[in-house]
Amino acid sequence: MPQRVVCLGTALALGLTVAQPGMAQLAAGGPQPNIVLIMADDMGFSDLGCYGSEIMTPNLDKLAKDGLRFTQFYNCARCCPTRAALLTGLYPHQAGVGHMMDDYGREHPGYRGNLGSDCVTIAQVLQTAGYQTMICGKWHVTRFVDREGPKYNWPLQRGFEKFYGTIHGGGSYFDPPTLTRDDGFVRPLGADYYYTDALSQQAAEYIEQAAAVKKPFFLYVAYTAPHWPLHAPPEVIARYRGRYANGWDALREERHKRMVALRIVKAQWPLTPRDQRVRAWEQNPYKAWQQRRMEVYAAQIDAMDRGVGRIMEKLRQLGAEQNTLVIFLSDNGGCAEEIGSGSKGLSISEKTRGGQPVQVGNDPNVTPGGEDTYQSYGIAWANASNTPFRLYKHWVHEGGIATPLVVRWPAVIAGGGELTDQPGHVVDIMPTCLAAAKVPYPTAYRANTLTPLAGQSLLPVFQGLPRQRGPIFWEHEGNRAVREGKWKLVSRFPDAWELYDLEADRTEMNDLAAKFPVIVQGLSGQYEAWTKRSHVEPWKQ
């Protein structure tokens, strides 16, 4: 009861109106957990060792061994919409972000600005229970230019007490654009600065500082790895030298076999054909350069995994590991974007810190990895990252929206190493965090009525119980989908609806739309109703 009084008092001080049905959560026993929420950027479904990859991810593999892996969890197909949904528990259109800003800093058609006043972030609500709140990494849910007045919408204005990271969506790992501490821009420190390592170090320091205060904390670690550009320390790249000499066709087959063996996917789901725009490996004229691209990409994930290890080691050192809920996921599928020599944007610097010109574009004559390069790993390797699915970031077929989700919480998740095929979506993360913390979702914030949560808590799944998940919806750049139970209705803009039975065919190879028109009609009706209540604007190319 005393804890309830503190929570309610803090809520009133912050201008929150508490939703009464959730009040029973505060009476539940047990201490409130720390929460560490970790997000990778542009990482495909099969890119972790515990999901079938050859990339060395021992720390995330250990999280999986100690915890729970989801095999049918989803994001919103792109960086900024997923972040909006993650932070607010709402679909991005509901949160006021719409299609947001692209990774170059350009505004898209349908862009609607900052997180709205009719939503709150996880951090804002957890403050009502006295949580300490910190963020390291990529923000990307506000207009970069907004520094003044009512549109000022950076982390410290959305419930976080400490921030080290970037406001913008991408950029150099050696000299990140918009690098910020709290509310002020800063410069990278040291000749050996590497953004992924700096985020991991800061996260560990935040944990140590929070432990000294003796109150639970919420830490959001939003890595940019492995988002382009292809930048990694040479010694980490060297760990993968020669690993991809057999090419992308062999890699996709290897990963698929491991995924079946690990029970991540079912054997009856066939591996999708190679993207028709990609040559067979044997026909590729730039094998050395192509290998190097994937070597650097793997190194970026490797470095992130080492950072996760650093975070977990700090929790162990402080005796906080047992009652800390750790959640790891990716914001979208692998990214097939090919960077051209004429690419420009806020994310691309003209020169390095040392004054050398940056060579922009996927030029086979330029070796990727160093600070003076700016390249991506391209369609063929993204196709491998998203094994066994098709399509990529931007699209809402499984390759664009399927994410690995690894959860570890020893105080609640019994056993370890288990898999669940219960579907979930990134909008479920906020209600999960609030339920874990025994904090109700408010109905109002500072006189603004809040949109009710779109997601549902994952706690029953953590406890090994069935969860009745309602329909899940997607819309991004006109690409649209709805999933209910085993059925998924999906369309690649501006094409017609396709229908798939995901129990029999999760790789979306057998379109059943013509065979089951009644199901198409029913699901499409649900989708149209969702677009109206969720403020989805028609997409214009």
Image (spheres, helix red, strand yellow):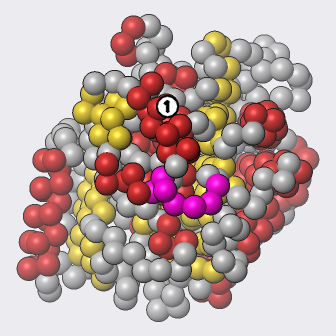
Q: Residue type at mark 1?
A: Thr
Image quarter for residue 160?
A: top right
Can residue 144 be seen here? The reply is yes
Q: Secondary structure at mark 1?
A: helix
- 345 to 204, vertically: above or below: above
Extreme residue toward the top, this view? 148
> Which residue corresponds to mark 1?
10
Which residue is rendered at x = 25% and y = 48% of the image?
478
- Crowding near the residue tagged with mark 1, few <14, some 14–19, many ≥20 C-alpha atoms within 10 Å: some
Quadrant housing the C terminus? top left
Where does residue 53 sit, x and y in percent of width and height? Answer: 69, 70
Where does residue 473 sit, x and y in percent of width and height? Answer: 28, 59
Image quarter for residue 218?
A: top right
Q: Which residues are magenta?
A: 25-31
Which residue is rendered at x = 27% and y = 73% of the image?
484
Q: Is residue 350 left or right of residue 509?
A: right
Q: Is residue 344 left or right of residue 186?
A: left
Q: Is residue 180 left or right of residue 83?
A: right
Can residue 282 be seen here? The reply is no
Where does residue 492 sit, x and y in percent of width and height? Answer: 28, 58
Which residue is rendered at x = 65% and y = 88% of the image?
261
Q: Is residue 189 left or right of residue 129?
A: right
